[in-house]
Image: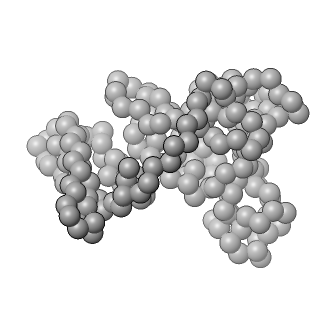
């Protein structure tokens, strides 16, 4: 298995809507510094774009998560979530997603360590999306009236940007508090690729 920086991959797939053909090649040589992944786009106007991304080999993690065991599902346009996240302080490390029967709330917890610069530590931001504003929203049986999940804001924004650039909707599967989020995508159009 290989490790690529998500920010570099996102920039490549920003222009995928104009691509007629897409090739992905892995080039491995004896020298680990020479390993790279090559992505070729052939656009409808005949333009060819070539991207070489360096990668490093890593030992694979054998964690297996199934979305079948997740009773809570949120499906939404990534642009909706990205516009909500622009209202949060720029140095924020973590956000909390709270799923309630009538809405999804994204908020920060100023009491917890979450800002890189603590001078804004008292700033509280909360964005609420009504269930009607979501593409699909399923909430299973709740133990406490809502389910709270806290995760890295930077990584979440990178995933949202990738899904947006792929012109997909983001699907968030939540099992319970303390369990990992399973994030997938579903196509909005006839594009046949999925992100899991």
Q: Position of residue 14 (x, y in %)?
A: 35, 48
Residue 146 visible at all: yes
- The figure's colour scheme reads one colour
Q: Is residue 152 left or right of residue 110?
A: left
Q: Position of residue 98 (x, y in %)?
A: 76, 40
Q: Quadrant of residue 175?
A: top right
Q: Which residue reaches farthest left?
A: 46
Residue at (23, 67) in percent of width and height:
31
Count numbered badges in the picture.
Answer: 0
Q: Position of residue 57 (x, y in %)?
A: 36, 58
Judging depth in this view, the residue of 88 and 13 nearest the camera is: 13
Q: Position of residue 58 (x, y in %)?
A: 41, 57
Q: Is residue 54 left or right of residue 79?
A: left
Q: Is residue 188 left or right of residue 37?
A: right
Q: Is residue 42 above or below residue 28?
A: above
Residue at (55, 42) in percent of width and height:
63
Judging depth in this view, the residue of 23 and 25 nearest the camera is: 25
Residue at (63, 52) in percent of width and height:
85
Residue 134 visible at all: no
Q: Quadrant of residue 147?
A: top right
Judging depth in this view, the residue of 6 and 157 nearest the camera is: 6
Residue at (47, 36) in percent of width and height:
196
């Amino acid at each position: 298995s290989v490790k690529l920086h998500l920010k570099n991959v996102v920039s490549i797939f920003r222009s995928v809507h104009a691509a007629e053909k897409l090739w992905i090649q892995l080039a491995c040589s004896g020298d680990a510094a020479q390993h790279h992944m090559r992505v070729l786009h052939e656009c409808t106007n005949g333009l060819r774009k070539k991207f070489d991304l360096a990668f490093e080999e890593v030992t694979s993690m054998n964690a297996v998560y199934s979305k079948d065991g997740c009773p809570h599902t949120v499906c939404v346009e990534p642009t909706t979530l990205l516009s909500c996240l622009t209202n949060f302080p720029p140095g924020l490390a973590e956000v909390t997603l709270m799923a309630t029967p009538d809405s999804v709330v994204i908020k920060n917890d100023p009491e917890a360590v979450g800002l890189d610069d603590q001078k804004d530590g008292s700033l509280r931001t909360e964005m609420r999306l009504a269930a009607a504003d979501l593409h699909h929203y399923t909430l299973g049986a709740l133990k406490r009236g809502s389910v709270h999940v806290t995760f890295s804001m930077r990584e979440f924004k990178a995933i949202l940007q990738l899904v947006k650039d792929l012109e997909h909707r983001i699907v968030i599967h939540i099992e319970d508090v303390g369990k990992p989020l399973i994030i997938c995508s579903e196509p909005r159009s006839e594009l046949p690729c999925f992100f899991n």
